[in-house]
Image: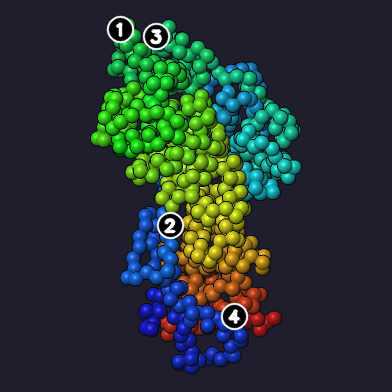
């Protein structure tokens, strides 16, 4: 092998240059011990595998690619979830500026005096708790209180992980440049260790001089954060008409608002409605206003009537529709549910699966024979749907969500069978429609704060090789939402702790790969459990998932430290092997540049020192990643001094790594036929230090 070829591919593991050329000038030969002999045998037996692992890599992996002249054995690949999904997960875990601005412009406290007192206490103490029933605006109030006390500061949503002893509080870092809120209402019960962790979180917030608001049920507040003096109880949500008045004036002005508030139809619509109904009407009114100038009375009447019709209460409409479609036309209910789940599907797919769902629910079809009754189109019209270019969709956007909401509330007996049927039916949808269908279940779960639809994605989609990839982004997003996150992560934890389906384990791994880019510690806990029960055939997928998580900014150090802890228990052989392979990949990776990625990511030197030592203690060969570091040292890059110090510190006081480093330098020198290199200087300093001792 030429020096140029070796420089490109790294050391040829079966060849020792010193055996061919003799010792280099000024070097002493030393006897090889049993460990060296074993290393040589291992290196020769794994030469081809290591070349394949390191030489062929598709950067940024935004799709799938496979290049091979011949394939033997298993093929391992993963479908990379792109930046769009990761961005959505980050936005789920953080409060976007647009959301904050919307809250500021629309917030109306039900009790102005109580809210003002709460703000004063929150501003003084930095920590508060908001209590109230679901739907009373607890989250909106929390966001508004934070932006009122600390204007301009980013707001983050905190979540807990009950599978960890301290509920994951040790992974939370608070600082004065941010404000935070934590919703406890989704947790049925917290153990004593979790309660202690919450109290420590309050102390951490005070030390950091940040601001933190809890959202809790009354009993939770009294049990977990009872020492907080700044408290607010919301007995009911703000009146919809008040919200409409405030927002409409800011969007359309006083004149338009006066005409709207004087309209009897609006007063009837907002009477007893939720504030969100008022917001929906304002947004639609702003969108549909006829022109920019003054309007006549007739223009106002037409404008208001059209908007109110467009924003009519879907529940009332559906209740009336369901009342009309019974007994003889009950099949139309089935057709409505089918379109809601499979919207965007081909007309033949809708008909086929509507028949299957009708049989499941023991409802006779309207088409007793292939030619009986009216055709598909009239029946679709009755459901508010239509056919365009052979695909079926509702005429009004959002109708699918309205139908699923209605079925979930008013016909709960359909839930289980509908989800099971849907997992088979969506197989006949095009790829983009499968993605839409998965998100419908996630959005349904989020609207109702019910984890069951997400569990159906795990239990029904997650056991299918054809559907798993479409469910993964939706499950991952659910895992970081404040409303569902704790319950979804608990479900994922239970799966990897059990001896269930390997396909479910694979689904959990891919979900962790995605949501780990936002919550790495939680995802790594579940991946660790998978490594303890998976076979060696899983190693490539496990290591790839770890690399993806580490690729996120600020996550490299988290992954390196975690992998170090995986090697501590000698009884976990598979976990130790996976950790060692992943460490070698992460330490040796140089991305698209010459500098090792762990250096360009700014990982602390002590973390890198521990990682190199852990790599050797895990029984992994260090030659490949070390060669990449030697190349960088010799190139004179900006971080060269930091790399030099890391290797020097790692070898000093660690005999095993010292020996591996020395051997790798010698091989690297022979391959490149160089003298007086930077790696040489590294060895000289190490040997001088050893002699001084």
Q: Which mark is residue 78?
A: 2
User: How far across and down, in percent of the image, does residue 58 sit?
Assistant: 38, 62
| Residue drawn at x 36%, y 24% as measured from the top left | 383
User: How far across and down, in percent of the image, does residue 158 sit?
Assistant: 59, 40
Mark 1 and mark 4 in contact? Answer it, CB < 8 Å: no
Gap between marks 1 and 4 measured at Cα: 90 Å
Mark 4 and mark 2 in contact? Answer it, CB < 8 Å: no
Of callouts 4 and 3, which one flags the residue occurring earlier in the amino acid sequence? 3
Of callouts 2 and 1, which one flags the residue occurring earlier in the amino acid sequence? 2
Q: Identify residue for label 1.
A: 298
Q: Nearer the viewer, mark 1 or mark 4?
A: 1
Gap between marks 2 and 1 measured at Cα: 60 Å
Gap between marks 3 and 1 measured at Cα: 11 Å
Badge 2 marks a residue whose secondary structure is: loop
Of callouts 1 and 4, which one flags the residue occurring earlier in the amino acid sequence? 1
Mark 4 and mark 3 in contact? Answer it, CB < 8 Å: no
Q: Identify residue for label 3.
A: 259
Dot 2: few (<14), some (14–19), or many (≥20) neighbours within 10 Å?
A: some
Q: Nearer the viewer, mark 3 or mark 1?
A: 1
Gap between marks 3 and 2 measured at Cα: 58 Å
Badge 4 marks a residue whose secondary structure is: helix
Of callouts 3 and 2, which one flags the residue occurring earlier in the amino acid sequence? 2
Badge 3 marks a residue whose secondary structure is: helix
Instruction: Between residue 380 and residue 564, name the one nearer to us.
Output: 380
Q: Quadrant of residue 434?
A: top left
Q: Which mark is residue 659?
A: 4
Mark 3 and mark 1 in contact? Answer it, CB < 8 Å: no
Mark 3 and mark 2 in contact? Answer it, CB < 8 Å: no
Dot 1: few (<14), some (14–19), or many (≥20) neighbours within 10 Å?
A: few
Q: Is residue 610 visible?
A: no
Badge 1 marks a residue whose secondary structure is: helix
Left or right of 213? Residue 358 is left
């Amino acid at each position: 092998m030429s020096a140029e070829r070796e420089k490109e591919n790294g050391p040829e593991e079966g060849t020792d240059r010193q055996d061919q050329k003799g010792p280099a000038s000024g070097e002493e030969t030393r006897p090889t011990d049993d460990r060296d002999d074993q290393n040589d045998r291992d290196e020769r037996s794994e030469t081809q595998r290591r070349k394949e692992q390191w030489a062929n890599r598709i950067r940024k992996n935004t799709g799938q690619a496979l290049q091979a002249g011949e394939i033997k054995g298993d093929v391992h690949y993963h479908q990379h979830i792109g930046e769009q999904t990761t961005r959505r997960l980050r936005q789920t875990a953080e409060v976007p500026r647009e959301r904050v601005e919307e809250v500021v412009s629309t917030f109306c406290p039900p009790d102005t005096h109580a809210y003002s007192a709460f703000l004063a206490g929150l501003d003084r103490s930095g920590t508060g708790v908001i209590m109230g029933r679901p739907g009373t605006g607890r989250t909106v109030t929390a966001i508004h209180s934070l932006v009122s006390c600390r204007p301009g500061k980013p707001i983050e949503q905190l979540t807990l992980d009950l599978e960890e002893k301290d509920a994951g509080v040790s992974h939370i870092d608070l600082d004065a440049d941010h404000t935070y809120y934590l919703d406890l209402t989704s947790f049925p019960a917290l153990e004593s260790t979790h309660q202690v962790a919450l109290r420590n979180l309050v102390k951490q917030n005070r030390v950091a001089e940040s601001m933190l608001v809890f959202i809790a049920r009354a009993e939770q507040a009294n049990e977990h954060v009872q020492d907080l003096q700044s408290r607010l109880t919301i007995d009911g949500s703000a009146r919809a008409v008040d919200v409409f008045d405030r927002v409409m004036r800011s969007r359309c002005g006083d004149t338009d608002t006066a005409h709207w508030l004087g309209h009897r139809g609006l007063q009837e619509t907002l009477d007893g409605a939720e504030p969100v109904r008022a917001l929906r009407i304002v947004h639609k009114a702003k969108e549909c206003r006829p022109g920019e100038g003054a309007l006549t009375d007739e223009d106002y009447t037409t404008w208001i009537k059209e908007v109110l019709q467009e924003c009519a209460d879907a529940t009332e409409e559906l209740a009336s529709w369901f009342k009309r479609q019974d007994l003889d036309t009950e099949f139309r209910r089935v057709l409505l549910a089918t379109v809601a789940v499979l919207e965007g599907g081909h007309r033949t797919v809708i008909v086929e699966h509507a028949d299957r769902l009708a049989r499941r629910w023991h409802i006779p079809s309207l088409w007793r024979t292939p030619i009986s009754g009216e055709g598909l189109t009239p029946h679709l019209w009755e459901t508010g749907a239509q056919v365009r270019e052979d695909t079926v969709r509702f005429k009004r956007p959002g109708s699918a969500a309205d139908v699923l909401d209605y079925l979930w509330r008013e016909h709960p007996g359909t839930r289980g069978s509908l989800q099971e049927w849907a997992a088979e039916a969506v197989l006949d949808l095009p790829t983009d429609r499968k993605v839409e269908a998965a998100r419908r279940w996630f959005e349904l779960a989020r609207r109702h704060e019910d984890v069951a639809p997400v569990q159906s994605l795990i239990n029904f989609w997650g056991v299918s090789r054809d559907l798993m990839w479409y469910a993964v982004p939706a499950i991952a997003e659910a895992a970081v939402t404040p409303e569902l996150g704790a319950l979804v992560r608990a479900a994922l934890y239970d799966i990897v702790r059990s001896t269930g389906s390997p396909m479910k384990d694979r689904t959990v791994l891919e979900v962790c790969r995605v949501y780990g880019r936002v919550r790495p510690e939680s995802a790594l806990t579940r991946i660790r459990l998978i490594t303890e029960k998976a076979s060696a055939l899983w190693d490539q997928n496990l290591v790839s998932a770890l690399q993806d998580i580490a690729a996120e900014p600020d996550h490299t150090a988290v992954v390196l430290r975690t992998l170090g802890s995986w090697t501590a228990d000698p009884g976990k052989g598979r976990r130790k092997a996976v950790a060692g392979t992943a460490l070698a990949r992460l330490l040796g990776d140089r991305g698209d540049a010459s500098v090792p990625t762990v250096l360009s990511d700014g990982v602390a030197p002590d973390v890198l020192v521990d990682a190199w030592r852990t790599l050797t203690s895990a029984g992994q060969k260090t030659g490949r990643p070390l060669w990449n570091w030697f190349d960088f040292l010799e190139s004179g890059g900006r971080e060269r001094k930091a790399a030099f110090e890391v290797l020097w510190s790692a070898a000093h006081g660690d005999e095993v790594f010292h020996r591996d480093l020395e051997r790798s330098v010698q091989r690297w020198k022979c391959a490149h036929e160089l003298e007086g290199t930077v790696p040489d200087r590294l060895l000289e300093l190490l040997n001088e230090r050893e002699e001084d001792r």
